[in-house]
């Protein structure tokens, strides 16, 4: 029996997915089927250099423990076989040398050290790898909820008095000039495969003059050897680069520690993400979300860099927008409902006991269009419209509602995976062409003008804006 296992080396670190004798912890049959289907499609892309290879299921633990023996050699046995100066069990002087341990004791010590060094990173890396497989190939979109961007009708201008070449997509966001109001939104990091994806997408963002967002940097809190999976500044030296950290994790850190995390990746700003729905379905997720607003207010006052508060697929309501504005927040990313359901992603990973909760809340959230319009009422300096944005017309509609740029995540990732760099560039060619066309046909020469053109709100979006 063979199992797909991701390439394990992270600059000498270990990314561990322990599968012994076919048993798969925290995995029910439906999750196994979903991940297997996603991994089969990923395996077909192996020749593209995406670090996937087949190994026997029973092999990884023993092989990794052997590797760890080598890595811990200096600590456990000294820098060479004969060294007698390495002491253990907390004794700084005399006795209890490693050499005095029995074979069983040394094996136990190695195992404990293995778990301490790798356990947390393994959990995060495994989760991030699952997220990638499901985001690329899984059926994890919202089932009935849409972005409601289809409810925004731009009014046709038959006499635009514009030439196509006059359409200027450029805009300034967070102090940086972009060639188009587009963000390649953050999705990944902390796993070996993420390094390839992040660097490829960051290079495209640099070439096209877009902003680029990293996935959650939580893995860096566990192991700094994961830094290579976020290190894209050399690929995108001038791009607007957004770091990413959960509000719960930020609340457990000083502002100086958060700033260090941002500086490690050379980011221009930090996205603090809110994801209570996703966490509640995630088996190993957070359960205590108290103090989030005070954490945001502290970082806004002390960080010294632009702070973007973002959701993760469930949107920001008008009341939350008001609280954020009161805390001094100037920039938000709505990450609304209608695109990838991260509750759905976690449901596919969930145990049988937790899966019904995920099924019940799969479509939970505020549609992207509603969230953009509700946030626009509060006068933020910057509104990023992400969550199911998949076309240039979607971007145009979001800008007409009050957003300053549109963010694309899953569609860009899928374009890269299916067509490589050229396929992803072709995807963004289409996005820009659709946006330019929508602007000309609406009589808008710039993104700012698009925010002032006539538009008609229809359908369910009317009720969202009328009742809230």
Image: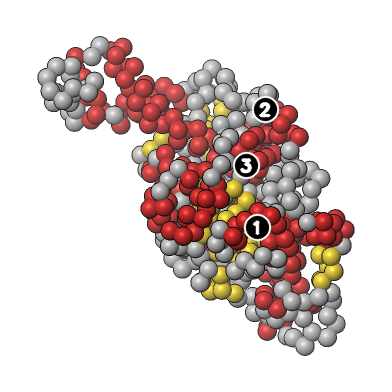
Front-most of 372 and 251?
Answer: 251
Residue that appears at 63% across and 35% down? 280
Instruction: Bin the neighbour count of mark 2 within 10 Å (Cα to Cα): few under 14, some 14-19, many 20 and up.
Output: some
- Taking the image as shown, residue 236 lies to the left or right of residue 370, namely left
Residue 354 is labelled as: 2
Label 3 and label 1: CA atoms lie apart by 16 Å
In contact (CB < 8 Å): disc 2 and disc 1: no
Upstream in sequence: badge 2 or badge 1: 1
Front label number (3 vs 1): 1
- Taking the image as shown, residue 284 lies to the left or right of residue 396, namely left
Label 2 and label 1: CA atoms lie apart by 30 Å
* Residue holding disc 3: 276
Label 3 and label 2: CA atoms lie apart by 15 Å
SS label for mark 3: helix
Q: Is residue 361 visible?
A: yes
Front-most of 302 and 412?
Answer: 302
Instruction: Bin the neighbour count of mark 3 within 10 Å (Cα to Cα): few under 14, some 14-19, many 20 and up.
Output: many
- Indicate the quadrant containing the N terminus: top left, top right, bottom left or bottom right: top right
Estimate the x, y position of residue 312 in percent, counting from the top left: 63, 49
Front label number (3 vs 2): 3
Furthest toward the right, the residue is 459
- Residue 166 sits in which quadrant? bottom right
- Taking the image as shown, residue 98 lies to the left or right of residue 117, namely left
- Taking the image as shown, residue 5 lies to the left or right of residue 161, namely left
As drawn, 442 above or below 382: below
- Indicate the quadrant containing the C terminus: top left, top right, bottom left or bottom right: bottom right
Upstream in sequence: badge 3 or badge 2: 3
* Residue holding disc 1: 321
Estimate the x, y position of residue 68 in percent, counting from the top left: 34, 28
- Residue 419 sits in which quadrant? bottom right
Residue that appears at 68% across and 61% down? 375
Front label number (2 vs 1): 1
């Amino acid at each position: 029996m063979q199992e797909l296992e991701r390439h394990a080396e992270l600059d000498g670190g270990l990314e561990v997915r322990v599968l012994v004798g076919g048993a798969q912890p925290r995995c029910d049959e439906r999750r196994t089927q979903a991940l297997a289907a996603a991994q089969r499609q990923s395996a077909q892309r192996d020749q593209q250099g995406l670090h996937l290879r087949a190994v026997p299921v029973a092999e990884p633990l023993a092989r990794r423990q052997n590797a760890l023996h080598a890595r811990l050699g200096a600590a456990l046995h000294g820098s060479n076989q004969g060294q007698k100066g390495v002491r253990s069990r907390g004794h700084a002087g005399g006795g209890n040398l490693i050499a005095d341990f029995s074979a069983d004791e040394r094996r136990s010590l190695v195992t404990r050290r293995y778990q301490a060094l790798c356990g947390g990173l393994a959990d995060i890396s495994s989760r991030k790898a699952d997220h990638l497989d499901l985001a690329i190939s899984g059926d994890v979109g919202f089932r009935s909820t849409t972005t409601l961007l289809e409810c925004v009708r731009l009014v046709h201008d038959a006499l635009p008095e514009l030439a196509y070449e006059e359409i200027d997509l450029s805009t300034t966001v967070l102090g940086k000039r972009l060639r188009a109001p587009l963000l390649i939104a953050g999705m990944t990091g902390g796993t070996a495969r993420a390094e390839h994806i992040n660097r490829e997408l960051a290079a495209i963002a640099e070439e096209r003059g877009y902003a680029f967002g990293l996935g959650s940097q939580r893995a860096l809190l566990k192991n700094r050897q994961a830094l290579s999976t976020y290190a894209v500044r050399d690929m995108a030296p001038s791009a607007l680069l957004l770091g990413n950290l959960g509000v719960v994790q930020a609340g457990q850190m000083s502002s100086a520690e958060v700033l260090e995390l941002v500086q490690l990746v050379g980011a221009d700003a930090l996205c603090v993400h809110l994801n209570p729905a996703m966490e509640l379905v995630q088996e190993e997720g957070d359960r205590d979300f108290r103090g989030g607003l005070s954490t945001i207010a502290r970082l806004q006052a002390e960080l010294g860099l632009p702070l973007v508060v973002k959701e993760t697929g469930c949107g920001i309501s008008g009341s939350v927008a008001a609280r954020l504005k009161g805390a001094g927040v100037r920039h938000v990313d709505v990450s609304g409902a209608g695109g990838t359901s991260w509750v759905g992603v976690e449901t596919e990973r969930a145990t049988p006991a937790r899966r019904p909760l995920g099924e019940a809340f799969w479509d939970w959230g505020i549609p992207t269009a509603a969230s953009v319009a509700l946030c626009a009422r509060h006068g933020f300096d910057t509104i990023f419209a992400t969550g199911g944005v998949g076309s240039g017309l979607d971007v145009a509609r979001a800008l007409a509602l009050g957003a300053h740029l549109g963010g694309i995540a899953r569609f860009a990732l899928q374009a890269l995976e299916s067509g490589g760099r050229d396929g992803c560039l072709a995807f963004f060619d289409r996005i820009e062409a659709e946006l330019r066309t929508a602007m000309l046909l609406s009589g808008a020469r710039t993104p700012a003008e698009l925010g002032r053109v006539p538009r008609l709100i229809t359908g369910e979006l009317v009720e969202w804006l009328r009742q809230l």
